[in-house]
Amino acid sequence: MDLLSFPPIAAILDAAYGLLMALADILQPVAGAASAALAVVVLTLSVRTILIPTGIAQARAEQTRARLAPKLQALRRRYKNDRERMSRETMKLYADEKASPLAGCAPVLVQAPIVGVVYALFLYPVIAGHPNALLSEQLFGVPLGASLAGSIVSGTATASAALVFGVVLVLILLIAEVTRRLFRPEVAASEEVPGGEALARMAGFLQFGTAVVAIFVPLAAALYLLVTVAWTLVQRLVLRRRFPIEPGTGT
């Protein structure tokens, strides 16, 4: 069964679709043929604004994890041959610090359905039983429903498509590189775990995964990904100042 066809979810998705298309109509006098693409950007920014509290919660959880990391590493070393004792001492540490090992999970669970509904608007050609007109709109002559990979495979790629997708991909890659450099995992801390150094380096390069995804999804979804990674970078920079992590305790 298609989860998006489940009546409550379909109704929510259809309402979000109606809001998006109404926004495109409002922006049409200003943006002309690019009004639908601009609506994607505005809707994405609006959703990210609504989700700022979850970002704050994640930043607080990250700060707590970094603060407790040295103590947790000490417990692992001390009780590495007694997993039951290590588990008890770990939970006691969290209780004493009035923290939770799952503190960073709740914000992700809260935003997942919201992000999922919005992202679906840019992926599916049919919404609640009717055609998704958004995907037939264009940006500089490129349909919002076209993907770079699909255009290349079908032989329908044009110079406009190469330019538009090229700009989107380059921007995503630049943001990924800035994010990797600014929030590089601390290798020294990862050395406590076998293979930790390699995992830490790999985590840094996972930032580029979004660019790979953008190659295969419709242009509307690629625009959503671009705005999202840009917002995330700026938000992390702001929140890192608000919830700083001491050197030597984390990223």
Image (cartoon, grey):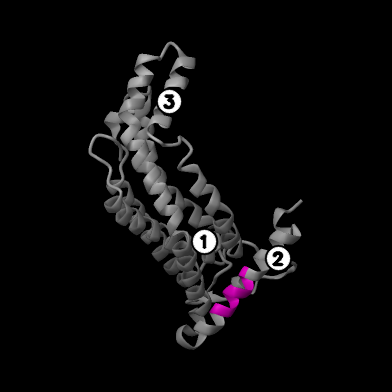
Q: Is residue 172 above or below residue 98?
A: below
Instruction: Say which label, 2 or 3, has the lower sequence index.
Output: 2
- The percent position of residue 162, horizontal first and vertical second, equals 45, 66
How far apart are the alpha carbons under marks 3 and 1?
52 Å
Residue, x 60% and y 60% (percent of image)? 117
- CB under 8 Å between discs 2 and 1: no
How far apart are the alpha carbons under marks 2 and 3?
45 Å
* Type of amino acid at the residue the image marks with label 1: Leu
Q: Residues within 10 Å of mark 3 (few under 14, many from 20)?
A: few
- Dot 1: what SS? helix
> Which image quarter: residue 197?
top left
Disc 3 designates what residue? 92
- Say the numbered circle drawn on residue 11: 2
**Is residue 245 rendered to the left or right of residue 203?**
left
Of circles 3 and 1, the one toward us is: 3
- Say the numbered circle drawn on residue 148: 1
Instruction: Say which label, 2 or 1, has the lower sequence index.
Output: 2
Of circles 2 and 3, the one toward us is: 3
Q: Is residue 34 above or below residue 164?
A: below
**Is residue 128 rendered to the left or right of residue 18?**
right
Give the overall secondary structure of the magenta segment. helix
Q: Residue furthest bottom?
A: 29
- CB under 8 Å between discs 2 and 3: no
Of circles 2 and 1, the one toward us is: 2
> Which image quarter: residue 118?
bottom right
- The percent position of residue 146, horizontal first and vertical second, equals 57, 66
Residue, x 37% and y 24% (percent of image)? 193
* Type of amino acid at the residue the image marks with label 3: Lys
